[in-house]
Image: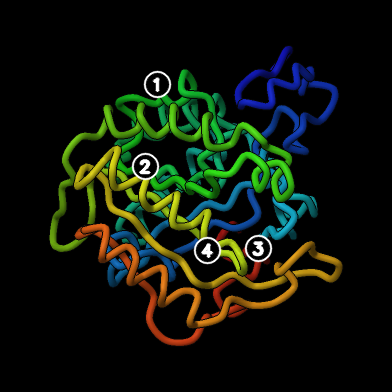
Amino acid sequence: MEICNICPRRCGVDRRYAHGYCGEGDRIRIARAAAHYWEEPCISGTRGSGAVFFGGCNMGCVFCQNGAISRGGRGRLYSDEETAAIFLRLEGEGVHNLNLVTPTHFTPHIKRALGIAHGSGFGLPVVWNSGGYECAETVKGLSGLVDVYMPDFKYMSGELGRRYSNAADYAQVAKAALDEMVMQRGEARFEDGIMTRGVIVRHLVLPDCAEDSRAVLSFLHRRYGNAIYISLMKQYTPMKAGLPDGLSRRLDDREYDALSAYALRLGIEQGFFQEGDPVGESFIPEFDLIGEE
């Protein structure tokens, strides 16, 4: 934490005394830790995914769906030992897996907490649910600790990365990180319909960004084929006023359906597609600390 270079921002902040680009210091912040039922079916299953939502984020997307915790400071601070106790509690509640949501900027803390939990008999599959913008060497350091990687792949366009996430190098960085994830996990494995090993890459479809979404899907299928699962998400919701371009409106069904059809034409066989109307804000959990007490 003295010179923080965990993520591609490499801001070099001493997080013992100041906050990094992620908005966090040297203790884990958790906004919610409870069973979560709104992930892909092979993650949530019937008993839910044990989702731990961490405060802060190294992305800073203008359209963030979880702004209350990514930049709003919601949550409580925990030691590594207390975090391990949360992991063990979730396992005791019978969830299918431990789902670490936006974990990148707390990677060293989480590794220590997992080590403590494993020492007490923890045995759930661990899901790394990230924005995809992380250093390949940081991901490499997770080998043997993470069972399922579930990163976003937001953009191919450097201009969109710059405009929406202050990350013109997003695609380049995400490709290198994803290469490492796929190399670590190999062929997906399932037990009773629940993924226990593998990689799911998520792409949130944004309004008026169809060309870039097609580029993302084409790249993912060409580079990784059936080594990954692709999840095409339609729940984009404008969360605040003053968003740029078409981001001030919800996604049109026709936009999503056209991209789904494109994915099928590409030959994507291992994919998740959302049916029905976009779920909007109902898809975003209350960050009310329920389950943390």
Q: Which three-letter amino acid code belongs to the residue tagged 4?
A: Ala
Q: Quadrant of residue 31?
A: bottom right
Identify the image quadrant of the C terminus.
bottom right
Judging by the rendered image, the residue that carries numbered circle 4 is 210
Judging by the rendered image, the residue that carries numbered circle 2 is 149
User: Dot 2: what SS?
Assistant: strand
Residue located 28% across and 43% down the image: 222
Q: Which three-letter amino acid code belongs to the residue tagged 1?
A: Lys
Judging by the rendered image, the residue that carries numbered circle 3 is 65
Residue located 80% across and 64% down the image: 243
Of residues 234 and 30, the one drawn nearer to the viewer in this rendering: 234
User: Along the polypeptide, which appears first: circle 3 or circle 2?
Assistant: 3
* Residue 148 coordinates in the image, percent (x, y): 32, 43
* Residue 34 coordinates in the image, percent (x, y): 49, 61
In three-dimensional space, the C-alpha distance between marks 4 and 1, rounded to whole angstroms, equals: 32 Å
Q: Which residue lies furthest to the top in this view?
A: 2
Task: State whether residue 234 is above or below residue 165.
Answer: below
Of residues 196 and 176, the one drawn nearer to the viewer in this rendering: 176
